[in-house]
């Protein structure tokens, strides 16, 4: 009976399965094999011991973070590849945020120059992708230090809600037309994965060194600089260091929010440089509100002393 049921299901899905197989390219297979290589072969070989002058460099933990980030990006890439055709603004923004919100910002800022009529939709896609970044932050913290999710939920939830409001406003202002996330190129280049791992190590060492020599106040500068182009590294390294009691919770969540604010500022700069005039106006207002709200959160939220 079970075998018969499986046959019936396969026959029912015969055409979609054939269409899916036809869409598979060598690049997709290579990307999946590379993820299997770094996750199933390289990761178990990494020593689970801390090294370095501050005892923060653990090869196993670092490579696990690399596998996590690569897996998220590859999953979003494959989802976009196999959706096929044009996708809506909301889906494009979500997938863009999972693949790379910075790359999505560059792509759609350029697109708005070529197609000014789509500037509103492109602005909404960039904002939605940037909102997904905060969902990624929750997910990454949950993976590396799950006990921190609830203590950080009010602050990170407030920023997520603020960005969701900005995205909704831009979505309402923009033309609701079909759009696509740019998925050209290699979805899982090993050089990029290794580069992210090195960036993560540099952030770990930088945070540890600054804290020891300059105090916790200087950590916010490190967070802002690190967050300009990549929020994942500062999020994961900070969560790890909170879990190891190297920095306290109040300092940690502020570092993550400051890194995310800096990233919003960087993407606003991308839009100001590459985008259409209407997109600059929309993103400038929306991201300006989000950045101001984030700074108010960092400065005014009461410390718990933990």
Image (cartoon, rainbow, N blue to C red):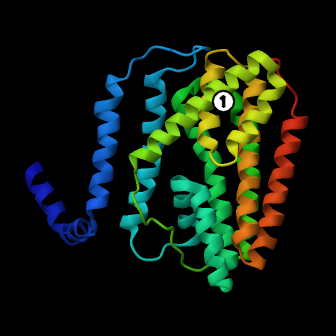
Q: Please state the horizontal and vertical placement of residue 89, each as a whole percent of the image.
A: 58, 71
Quarter of the image where one finds residue 113: bottom right
Please say if 21 is above or below 205: below
Say which quadrant the C terminus sits in: top right
Closest to the observer, 128 or 16: 128
Helix or strand or loop: what does disc 1 sit on?
helix
Closest to the observer, 241 or 7: 241
Closest to the observer, 5 or 27: 27
Residue 282 in the figure: left or right of residue 208: right
Residue at position x 61%, y 16% in the image: 244
Which residue extends farthest right?
A: 300
Closest to the observer, 150 or 196: 196
Residue 200 in the figure: left or right of residue 284: left
Quarter of the image where one finds residue 52: top right
Quarter of the image where one finds residue 185: bottom left
Q: How many marks?
A: 1
Residue 9 in the figure: left or right of residue 301: left
Please say if 122 is above or below 115: above
Please say if 31 is above or below 215: below
Q: Which residue lies under the disc numbered 1?
A: 150
Any part of residue 226 in sight: yes
Residue at position x 74%, y 34% in the image: 222
Q: Please state the horizontal and vertical placement of residue 231, each as a whole percent of the image.
A: 64, 43
Q: Please state the horizontal and vertical placement of residue 150, each as a whole percent of the image.
A: 66, 29
Q: Please state the horizontal and vertical placement of residue 154, each as a whole percent of the image.
A: 74, 36
**How many neighbours does mark 1 have within 10 angstroms: few (below 14), some (14-19), or many (20 or more)?**
few
Any part of residue 306 in sight: no
């Amino acid at each position: 009976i079970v075998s018969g049921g499986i046959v019936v299901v396969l026959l029912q899905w015969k055409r979609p399965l054939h269409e899916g197989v036809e869409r598979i390219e060598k690049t997709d297979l290579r990307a999946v094999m590379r993820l299997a290589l770094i996750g199933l072969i390289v990761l178990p070989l990494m020593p689970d011991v801390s090294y370095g002058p501050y005892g923060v460099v653990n090869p196993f933990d670092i490579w696990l973070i690399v596998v996590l980030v690569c897996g998220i990006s590859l999953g979003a890439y494959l989802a976009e590849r196999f959706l096929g055709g044009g996708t809506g603004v909301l889906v494009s923004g979500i997938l863009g945020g999972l693949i790379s919100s910075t790359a999505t910002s560059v792509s759609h800022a350029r697109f708005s120059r070529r197609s000014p009529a789509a500037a509103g939709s492109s602005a909404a896609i960039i904002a939605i992708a940037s909102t997904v970044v905060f969902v990624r932050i929750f997910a990454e913290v949950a993976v590396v230090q799950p006990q921190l999710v609830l203590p950080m939920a009010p602050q990170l939830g407030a920023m997520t809600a603020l960005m969701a409001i900005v995205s909704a406003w831009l979505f309402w202002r923009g033309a609701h037309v079909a759009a696509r996330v740019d998925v050209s190129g290699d979805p899982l280049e090993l050089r990029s994965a290794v580069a992210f791992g090195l960036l993560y190590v540099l952030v770990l060492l930088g945070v540890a060194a600054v804290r020891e020599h300059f105090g916790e106040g200087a950590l916010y500068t490190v967070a802002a600089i690190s967050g300009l182009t990549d929020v994942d590294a500062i999020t994961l390294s900070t969560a790890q260091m909170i879990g190891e009691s190297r920095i306290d919770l109040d300092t940690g969540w502020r570092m993550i929010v400051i890194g995310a604010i800096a990233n919003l500022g960087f993407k606003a700069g991308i839009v100001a440089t590459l985008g259409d005039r209407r997109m600059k106006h929309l993103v400038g207002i929306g991201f300006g509100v989000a950045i101001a709200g984030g700074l108010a959160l960092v400065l005014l939220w009461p410390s718990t002393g933990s």
